[in-house]
Image: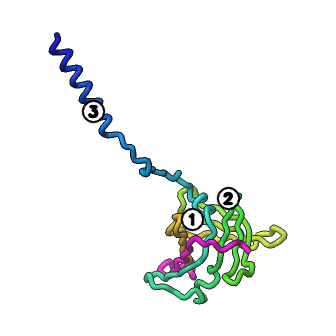
Amino acid sequence: MNALKKLCYLLAMFALTITAASCSDNDEEIVVVEPELTPSQVLASTPWETTNAKNQNGQSVPLTDSNVANFVGFAYFKADGTFTMYNLDNSPKMHGDWSISADGTTRTIVAKDNNGNVLFTRVVKITVLTKQEFTYRVFPDANNQSVYYDIIHTPTTHPEP
């Protein structure tokens, strides 16, 4: 019986030694886990600036190209579901309401005039939505899905005019 007590004592001491050895005094090692954001929260988390556009072949297209120029500017998507957009010269472009599908695959904007009347609704396919990039796809001819342009936005610190 005495040998069994000694064995248990040794095993307990071994376990304590292993536990103590695995602890760290290193306070510099801090792990921060960011909460998962919904697609809507990601879009509303920062102002966006159009920084590039690419065609269906992956080639960059000048932002002045007539196929993409209408989509260029600064966009401010607010958490309350409203948005404002400005041209790169800070002139007003449009405002209204926005939403993203729950699965993050489409964004809808409903542009309105100053009286709140709907001017148009645009639904686009989202190809990238991260905190570093927001890209959506537009088709010049809805009946020809082989020709498209990806409108690429990145976060900006540009204040809303």
Q: Nearer the viewer, residue 20 or 141?
A: 20
Q: Nearer the viewer, residue 84 or 16?
A: 16
Q: Is 5 situated left or right of 97 in this image? A: left
Q: Nearer the viewer, mark 3 or mark 1?
A: 3
Provide the secondary structure element on which disc 1 rests.
strand
Q: Nearer the viewer, mark 2 or mark 3?
A: 3
Q: Which residue is mark 2?
A: 79
Q: Nearer the viewer, mark 1 or mark 2?
A: 2
User: Considering only order in the chain, which callout, 1 or 3, is on the residue closer to the N terminus?
Assistant: 3
Q: Is residue 31 above or below residue 132?
A: above
Q: Which residue is mark 3?
A: 17
**Mark 3 belongs to which amino acid?**
Thr
Q: Quadrant of the C terminus?
A: bottom right
Q: Position of residue 17 (x, y in %)?
A: 27, 33
**Mark 2 belongs to which amino acid?**
Ala
Q: Position of residue 9 (x, y in %)?
A: 23, 20
Q: Which residue is mark 1?
A: 106
Q: Position of residue 18 (x, y in %)?
A: 27, 35
Q: Nearer the viewer, residue 126 or 158?
A: 158
Provide the secondary structure element on which disc 3 rests.
helix
Q: Position of residue 76 (x, y in %)?
A: 67, 69
Q: Which residues are magenta?
A: 140-161
Q: Callout 2 environment at 10 Å: few (<14), some (14 to 19), or many (20+)?
A: some
Q: Is 51 situated left or right of 79 in this image? A: left
Q: Residue furthest right?
A: 115
